[in-house]
Amino acid sequence: MNRIPVQQTLDERLEAAATLLGEAGRIAVLSGAGMSAESGIPTFRDALTGLWARFDATELATPQAFERDPALVWGWYEWRRMKVLQSQPNPGHIALAQLAARGVAVTVVTQNVDDLHERAGSRAVHHLHGSLHVPRCFDCGARAAFGPQIPAEPEGGRRLDPPRCTRCGGPIRPGVVWFGEMLPEDAWQAATEAILNCDVMIIIGTSGLVYPAAGLPDLAAGRGKPVIQINPAPTDHDAYARVSLRGKAGELLPALLARLG
């Protein structure tokens, strides 16, 4: 594999990445928390603020926590969802949608639970860790809809009773993957198919520490697919990325698009 050394200039590495993209008909994208962070959405492991600061996010994101205190967990996730609704897609999200608009088949596989890719205009988006915007029944699993929204700035630590399922009466839970739960089978299958069928893979804003998603770039590289990485800092993906671009997605993706003409 002809890896482009990070010692080369950014312009040289951008040009190499643009050449790979220009020759690709099918592109698979894996996006992580770093991409949403550029839109002002705190990463899951960022310290909680306000009255939420007395809670541990990892202890709220479990089925057991919801069973113990559904109002607390639902209130926290509604607070997160309101933060997402107040945020906007950044230039990186928009550049990916524009890349697909050029006639290239772009499939986005995301570890993020927001809808910024969709709001930017991307059509083929698969959420490996679920979505804040697709709640479902805790008991029967039926997909649900949100009722009237809570205030845009709910008080931190607010308890909020979850709505009830119209089918079985069970409590509605956030549509995200909690610790100890399996990834959605349809999203995982779509992700692996996108990787196996792509000509180039782009990984953006992901540390490579959360599995099984972290294994997707390795799958691509193992099949001889060139991998382009966009991240401000080194990651475990450096070992097999054909081109590593150090910086923000909101700056580098538009720069790549400009080079494609």
Image: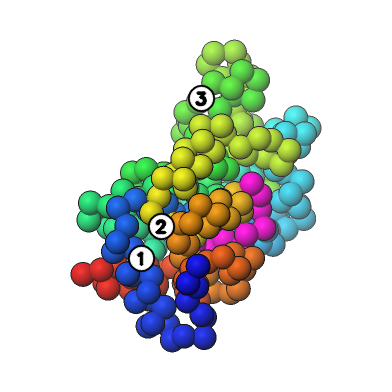
Pick the front one: 162 or 7: 7
Decide: marks 1, 2 in contact (CB < 8 A)? yes
Q: Is residue 169 left or right of residue 12?
A: right
Q: Considering only order in the chain, which callout, 3 or 2, is on the residue closer to the N terminus?
A: 3
Where residue 255 sits, quadrant-wise, is: bottom left
Residue on which disc 2 sits = 200
Main structural element of the magenta stretch: helix, strand or loop?
A: loop
Residue on which disc 1 sits = 20
Count of numbered badges drawn on the protein: 3
| Alpha carbons under labels 1 and 2: distance apart | 7 Å
| Magenta part of the chain | 204-212
Q: Considering only order in the chain, which callout, 2 or 1, is on the residue closer to the N terminus?
A: 1
Reply yes or no: does residue 208 show up in magenta. Answer: yes
Report the amino acid beneath label 3: Arg
Where residue 209 sits, quadrant-wise, is: bottom right
Pick the front one: 260 or 87: 260
Q: Considering only order in the chain, which callout, 3 or 1, is on the residue closer to the N terminus?
A: 1
